Image (cartoon, rainbow, N blue to C red):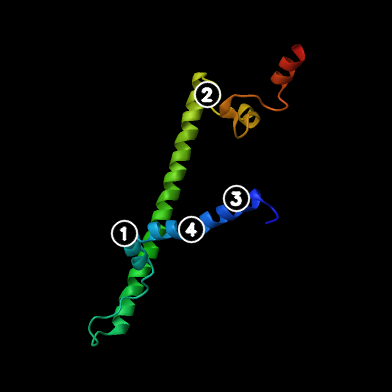
């Protein structure tokens, strides 16, 4: 072996991955609930238990159910959109009331733009004026 111990560690890590992935997958996907959900999800058409069943009628009933589901989903999307609009209108009203009371502007965009992703940590920020003043004063 040319790499020595480093090569042995790499081979051990690869061996662990080769064993861990199939074991984890078999543990995760061998649950009865997961198998039941998967079988129900990928079932495109129920097969008739009786050979005298009319497949065309069954197909039409499944198509009708699917169309009803699509219509229901559209209605729910419209309800969510109207609810979202109502919520935004209520937020605007609350903001106007707060400004009218003299509470100031609720949305402090200037400070939120300066803070960045990890502003909640409150730590050192690169290039901020406060930190430059502190470091120059020392």
| Viewer-closest of 138 and 52 | 138
Disc 3, disc 1: CB below 8 Å?
A: no
Rendered view: 40 above or below 21: below
Is label 3 or label 4 in front?
A: 3
Neighbour tally class for label 2: few under 14, some 14-19, many 20 plus, Cα within 10 Å:
few
Neighbour tally class for label 4: few under 14, some 14-19, many 20 plus, Cα within 10 Å:
few
Q: Position of residue 30 (x, y in %)?
A: 35, 61
In three-dimensional space, the C-alpha distance between marks 3 and 4, rounded to whole angstroms, equals 15 Å
Q: Earlier in the sequence, mark 4 or mark 2?
A: 4
Give me the disc on residue 33: 1
Quarter of the rendering occupied by the C terminus: top right
Rendered view: 53 above or below 128: below
**Disc 1 secondary structure class:** helix
Q: Position of residue 107 (x, y in %)?
A: 56, 29
Residue to which mark 2 is pinned: 99
Residue to which mark 4 is pinned: 19
Q: Earlier in the sequence, mark 2 or mark 1?
A: 1
In three-dimensional space, the C-alpha distance between marks 3 and 2, rounded to whole angstroms, equals 64 Å
Neighbour tally class for label 1: few under 14, some 14-19, many 20 plus, Cα within 10 Å:
few
In three-dimensional space, the C-alpha distance between marks 3 and 1, rounded to whole angstroms, equals 38 Å
Is label 3 or label 1 in front?
A: 3
Disc 4, disc 2: CB below 8 Å?
A: no
């Amino acid at each position: 072996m040319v790499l020595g111990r480093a090569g042995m560690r790499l081979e051990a890590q690869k061996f662990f991955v080769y064993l861990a992935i199939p074991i984890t997958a078999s543990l995760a996907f061998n649950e009865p609930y997961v198998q039941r959900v998967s079988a129900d999800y990928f079932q495109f058409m129920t097969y008739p238990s009786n050979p005298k069943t009319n497949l065309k009628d069954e197909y039409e009933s499944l198509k009708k159910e699917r169309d009803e589901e699509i219509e229901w989903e559209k209605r729910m999307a419209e309800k969510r959109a109207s609810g979202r609009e109502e919520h935004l209108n209520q937020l605007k009203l609350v903001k106007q009331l707060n400004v009218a009371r003299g509470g100031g502007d609720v949305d402090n965009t200037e400070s939120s733009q300066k803070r960045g992703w990890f502003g909640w940590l409150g730590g050192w920020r690169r290039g901020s004026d406060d930190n430059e003043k502190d470091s120059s004063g020392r």
